[in-house]
Amino acid sequence: MEELVVKRWRKNGKDRLYVNRSGPRGQAVAWYDCITNEMHVLVEELRDAASAKIAEWRRANQSQVQYEGERPAARNPLQAPAVPPLPTLTPDDDLALNRPGASLQEMARAKELEHSRLVRLASRLTRGTLVPESIRNGLAGELAVGSALERLASAGWHVLHGIKWPSGSDIDHLAIGPSGVFTVNAKHHEGASVWVGDVMLRINGGSTDYLRNSEFEAARTAKLLRYWCGRDIPVQPVIGVVGAKTIKIEGRNPTVLVLNADSIDRALAARSHVLSAGQVASIYAVARHKQVWLSTRSKRRSR
């Protein structure tokens, strides 16, 4: 990865962070306005690297600078401690490298390996499958929702996939963008009729625990991000439905967004903007760390 450096510049009432290529005459690839909390990218292919460097600088220098709109209230002895330093980000720990459905693909391969080589060969020759239908459906759902969410990248969003908790369960997708932070659970129900009330989601008339589980996942994520980011970050739970014949929303005050996977990207992008580019970058810089989600803090919060 190309080395980048951050330099602070203050003059005539302006306060900016410039991200430059290394060297005495390093080219600027992005700059961040400390007053408006907005990032301006000059070299698009280095957007993610520049975002990470800005977030890293802000975390390391938070005691030296106070940003407009982020003025802390009077110190309360019961407040959470200062934001902890992020773990070192290695390729093995970078969730940005995860692809949609990777965990389920591993499960599918494990199921195939439970059978002998002869059985696996026969299955391929007859175009059969040794993978349970639940895994195949789940994988198709995560691939469809993940692909739709990836379309948000051009609008300043970041999407992470397969974020594992210490228990082994995972968040299918996490979308971070101008409209906020969203935990997205993919559900594949081909040809089904989906009904959504305030506290219940039904598939072909049958009850599910989808809404409750989605709310719990979002609340858990919000608590973890608050600890690592040092401020409250609302997280909206979302269910992306794949293959449904109909989706009927009848709840008056739904706490979970239930969206058709085909248009989930447009639905999220159309929501009111609540985060600046700088805030998006700083949250993403935290969320992409695998060890953040596997940390002792994560285990303590999950009880």
Image (spheres, rainbow, N blue to C red):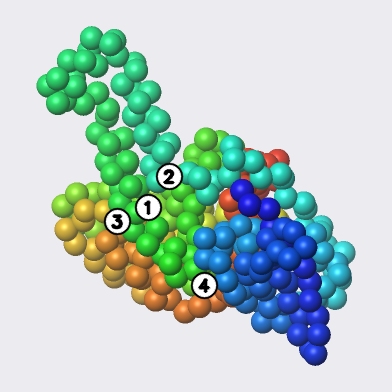
Report the disc number at residue 99.
Answer: 2
Mark 4 and mark 2 lie on one chain; the one further toward the N terminus is 2
Residue at position x 85%, y 67% from top? Answer: 63
Q: Label 3: few (<14), some or many (≥20) within 10 Å?
A: many
- What element does badge 3 sit on? strand
Mark 3 and mark 1 lie on one chain; the one further toward the N terminus is 1
Compared to 90, does 213 lie above or below?
Answer: below
The percent position of residue 4, horizontal first and vertical second, equals 69, 58
Mark 2 and mark 3 lie on one chain; the one further toward the N terminus is 2
Mark 4 and mark 3 lie on one chain; the one further toward the N terminus is 4
What kind of residue is marked 1? Answer: Gly
Task: Look at the numbered discs 2 and 1 and tell me whether their residues touch, using CB distance below 8 Å.
Answer: yes
Nearest to the eye among marks 4 and 2: give it.
2
Residue holding disc 1 = 146
Report the disc number at residue 178.
Answer: 4
Task: For the C terminus, give its image quadrant.
Answer: top right
- What element does badge 4 sit on? loop
The CA span between labels 3 and 1 is 12 Å
Task: Look at the numbered discs 3 and 1 and tell me whether their residues touch, using CB distance below 8 Å.
Answer: no
The percent position of residue 162, horizontal first and vertical second, equals 47, 44
